[in-house]
Amino acid sequence: MLINIQIIIGLLSISLLLFTLELIRKKRLREEYSILWLSTGLATLIFSLAPMFFLTNFFSRITGLYYLSAAVLIIFLFLLLIVLHFSVVISKLTDRNKDLAQRHALLELELNELKKRTLSSSASP
Amino acid sequence: MVEQKIAIIIPAFNEEASVGEVIERVHRQFPRGDVVVINDGSTDLTSEKARANQATVLDLPFNLGIGGAMQTGYRYAYEKGYDISIQVDADGQHDPAEIPKLLEPLEAGRADMVVGSRFVGESKYRASIMRRLGISLLSGVISIINRQIITDPTSGFRAVNRRAMELFVADYPQDYPEPEVLVLMGRCRLKIEEVAVRIDPRFYGESSITRIRSAYYMIKVLLAIFVDIFKRRPILKEEGRIC
């Protein structure tokens, strides 16, 4: 029973690690996020290698985790936090994007007026 | 007294059919004002039509929505030293001949923002029951929060002085800004006054708020207003103080 889940989680975490490494290699992931996802992959890999250690020994004494479903819940909450964090990041980016667009429009107008002025002054010296 | 510099800000998103005529009417009926069109990432000829009618045009690289567009206009007016900014919609429902009515309370120093209201005094404005119900619910909520009667919170026909512009440069709500701005003004202790204006039916097209979307609009705006009450007040950049 447990061995099946071990294999599935193990394979998932290995592919997560490989996928993360590939994204880093292609520079599609910023450093802060690559560390986050690498450690997530590593943590699940370790968990899949020795789940009984986490579910029975010292770990369960700290966390009160005695069932695999409880571990899944923890992972779910972790992912929820990450998603929330991303919403915050996206909000900040949207705000900055808006400021940039506005600044861009103001500067473009300034530039066009400057161009017009230099053109007219060079046309009639 | 020195003549005050007045900017007429016209936010426009795909309004090529009406924007030219609106600018033309402003030039004719309120020649004192400098017309600034904010082209909010239009995919039609809005920008070209506005330029052809001797307006200053600010082209946003992509669509920001009415809030982002208006804020661009306020930033421009503030940086260029305008004393008063007036928002006029590009669909032609605001009559430029009514602008002097908006100016009077500002010039008398009674208000920081003057809103042209469809419901002050005698009004010929007719809307569907649902729309009027929505507007009165909004006006009730905002009147309570601001401790001041606001009859027409969704009107976009408004004039502001430099104090209000300074606030809008720092913070301006984005999606459906008209009602939210009133709450923001109230929180920053800026004064609002309403005057009666005539609002024409639109030249072209429909309101951006259709019947299906109006329920969504109401929920969104009420939620935004509710959140606004708990938000930290914005910091004014120029003076580095809280509004």
Image (cartoon, rainbow, N blue to C red):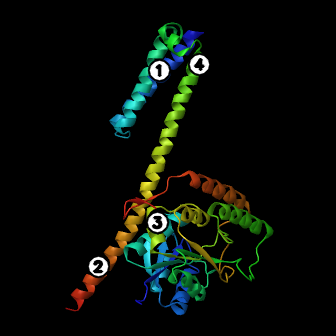
Q: Secondary structure at mark 1?
A: helix
The residue at 44%/21% (across/down) is A43
Tell me if residue A8 comes above or below residue B35 in the rendering.
Answer: above
Chain ID for label 4? A
Give amino acid for label 3: Leu
Q: Secondary structure at mark 3?
A: helix
For the residue pair B38 and B173, the one nearer the viewer reads as B173
Query: Where residue B141 sits: x, y (%)?
Result: 68, 61
The residue at 50%/44% (across/down) is A87
| Residue assigned mark 3 | B167
Q: Give how far apart the Cα atoms at labels 4 and 1 are.
A: 14 Å
Q: Secondary structure at mark 4?
A: helix
Q: Same chain for marks 1 and 3?
A: no
| Residue assigned mark 1 | A44
Q: Is residue B40 visible?
A: no
**Which quadrant holds residue A65?**
top right
Chain ID for label 3? B
Q: Give how far apart the Cα atoms at labels 1 and 2 are.
A: 60 Å
Tell me if residue B30 comes above or below residue A82 in the rendering.
Answer: below
Q: Residues within 10 Å of mark 1 (few under 14, many from 20)?
A: many
| Residue assigned mark 2 | A115
Q: Same chain for marks 4 and 2?
A: yes
Q: Are marks 1 and 2 in contact (CB under 8 Å)?
A: no
Give amino acid for label 1: Thr
**Which quadrant holds residue B146?**
bottom right
Q: Which mark is residue A70?
A: 4
Give amino acid for label 2: Lys
Q: Residues within 10 Å of mark 2 (few under 14, many from 20)?
A: few
